[in-house]
Amino acid sequence: MDPLLTAAGDRLGAYHDRLARLVAVDSGSGQVDGLREAADLVQTWCLAAGLAVEREAVADPSGAPLGDVLIARRRGRGERRILLAGHLDTVFPPGTAANRPFRVQEGRAYGPGVSDDKGGLLAGLAAVEVLGALGREEYGELVLVCTPDEEIGSPGSRPLLRTLGAEADVALCLECARDNGDLVSARKGVADLEIVLRGRAAHAGIEPERGANALLAAARLTVALDALNGRWPGVTVNVGVLESGGRPNVVADRARMLVDLRAWRTGEYAAALAEIRRLVAEPIVAGVRGELSVHAPTPPWEPGPEGRWLTELAAKVGAGLGLPVSHTATGGCADANLLAEAGATVLDGLGPVGGDDHSPAEWLDLDSVVPRVALLAGLVDEVARR
């Protein structure tokens, strides 16, 4: 058997135990106590593996705490700096870990965050341990970063991620592989848009002409935004939330819309955002004015020559392990987008195989853990030697 597979197999028991303990901690975005408890666990395991650990508290733009970024480092004998990136936060509310505890059934693990991204993060740590056990430390520095806010766009972690991305030669992201085993080689850019429409209230029966209906403006704007779908290849605009009005006999003086914008290409992303700004600024209904806020804008991660080299190298490593490796682009964004923007050569989906993320059915294929840890360790080793 290949030494990478043997060494990864030796770590499987520890991986299972760690996964059960980490999934048992509620660590939804913004649940600071749980996120710090999860970071404490990972810190303990990193220190035991011989990594030096730093912690930095981060907050959102309003100053609200989001938890700690954990950065674990291990020096090697070579020159290349390789970044492994995962996240501690989930999308689930407090109490989920108790209501839906970690379990294993028919070769799959279930529980909140088991695939996204606790299983992937622990695969990264296991790969570091595999390389250490085999003495394959030809990298200059191996850095494992664990963030507490990826699921909400990394508003607090962005400065650190951009610094780490700029310093890294290669960033290998630990989101789990797609449910068919694919790695991820490109991601759409995303912008979360908040539109507030301000009109003027009036009695709907006595003097409706004195009002300026923000709800009507929101309805017309919804139709206009939906018409942007298909204008640029791969650009999607979705009005997910529309709030307005309080009583049927009052002309609504305010409306609020939450909109999701996604695009494959940077130019199309910018063009769509500019058109949305124009639509919000123009008077859709007389007397109603609009305000647009863009939250956590994340640019597209577009494939390039270096990225293609990295996917080809992963396929070569996989072939040596008897593991077919393919890759795909996905519409969901992640910290990989930010690392690519910072200048790193990026490949994602390097955790074990998982699926049904963000749902009660979320699962992780435990049979995939050993080959995927071996693949990740082998890829780090190959990158370090080139």
Image (cartoon, rainbow, N blue to C red):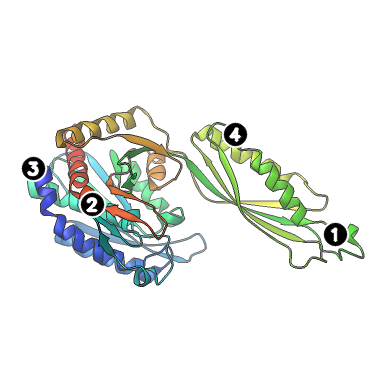
| Residue 53 location, quadrant | bottom left
The local secondary structure at tag 3 comes to helix
Q: Which residue is mark 1?
A: 211
The local secondary structure at tag 1 comes to loop
Q: Earlier in the sequence, mark 4 or mark 1?
A: 1
Q: Which residue is mark 2?
A: 123
Decide: few, some or many residues near mark 1? Use Cα within 10 Å; few <14, some 14-19, many ≥20: many
Q: Gap in Å between the C-alphas at discs 3 and 1?
A: 75 Å
**Is 270 above or below relative to 15?**
above
Decide: few, some or many residues near mark 2? Use Cα within 10 Å; few <14, some 14-19, many ≥20: many
Number of dots carrying numbers: 4
Q: Which residue is mark 4?
A: 230
| Residue 381 location, quadrant | top left
Q: Gap in Å between the C-alphas at discs 4 and 1?
A: 35 Å
Q: Gap in Å between the C-alphas at discs 3 and 4?
A: 50 Å
Q: Which mark is residue 3?
A: 3
As drawn, is 222 to the left or to the right of 11?
right
Q: Gap in Å between the C-alphas at discs 1 and 2?
A: 59 Å
The local secondary structure at tag 4 comes to loop
Q: Nearer the viewer, residue 345 or 328?
A: 328
Q: Gap in Å between the C-alphas at discs 3 and 2?
A: 17 Å
Q: Earlier in the sequence, mark 3 or mark 1?
A: 3
User: Nearer the viewer's eye, disc 3 or disc 1?
Assistant: 3
